[in-house]
Every structure is written in C-alpha cells, then in structure tokens.
Image: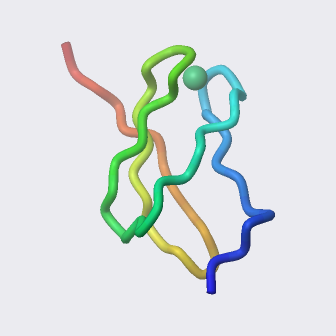
Amino acid sequence: MADANLKITCPDCNSEIPQIEGMVVGDILECSECGTEVEIQSLEPLTYRELIEEK
Ligand SMILES: [Zn+2]
C-alpha cells in the first residue's frame, strides 16, 4: 500500500505535486505552479527526479 504521507515536492518551486491514482514507475507528473516535470523512479520508497526539458 502506498504511504499517503509521502509527498512529491517540485524541485524547482517547492510546490507540492499531487500524486496520481495508480501511479507507476516512469510516470511523469507536472507541477501545476511552474510546469516542471518529474519522473517517478521508484514507489517504495518514493523517489523521483526532475526532467530537464530542452527547448
Ligand atoms: Zn514547480
């Protein structure tokens, strides 16, 4: 069971990024504040990294 206390925090602006239901490794979540994307790397424990978008 996923730990509801674990939070994903935007590495750029520190806003909390809500987890999605049924989240799996490799999912991409986007910060609603600044648009930074993070990729889920592991669920237990929850780890993620910022995706650097080339423009
Ligand atoms: Zn952000």
Outermost residue toward the front in this view: 21
* In this picture, residue 5 sits left or right of residue 7: right
> Measuring 72% from the left and 74% from the top, which residue is drawn there?
3
> Measuring 66% from the left and 20% from the top, which residue is drawn there?
13
> Measuring 31% from the left and 63% from the top, which residue is drawn there?
26
* In this picture, residue 33 sits left or right of residue 14: left
Q: Does residue 23 sit above or below 3 in this rendering?
A: above
Instruction: Choose between 4 and 11: the one closer to the eye.
Output: 4
Dividing the picture into quadrants, the one containing residue 15 is top right
Q: Does residue 55 sit above or below 51 in this rendering?
A: above
Outermost residue toward the right in this view: 5
Q: Does residue 8 sit above or below 47 in this rendering?
A: above
Measuring from the top left, give residue 24's x and y in whole percent: 37, 70
Measuring from the top left, give residue 7's x and y in whole percent: 71, 53
Outermost residue toward the bottom in this view: 1
- Colour pattern of the rendering: rainbow
> Measuring 63% from the left and 78% from the top, which residue is drawn there?
2
Q: Does residue 42 sit above or below 1 in this rendering?
A: above
Instruction: Choose between 11 and 22: the one closer to the eye.
Output: 22
Number of numbered tags placed on the structure image = 0
Ligand 1 resides in the quarter of the picture at top right
Measuring from the top left, give residue 34's x and y in whole percent: 51, 15
Dividing the picture into quadrants, the one containing residue 46 is bottom right
The quadrant in which the N terminus is found is bottom right
The quadrant in which the C terminus is found is top left
Measuring from the top left, give residue 12's x and y in whole percent: 60, 24
Instruction: Choose between 55 and 3: the one closer to the eye.
Output: 3
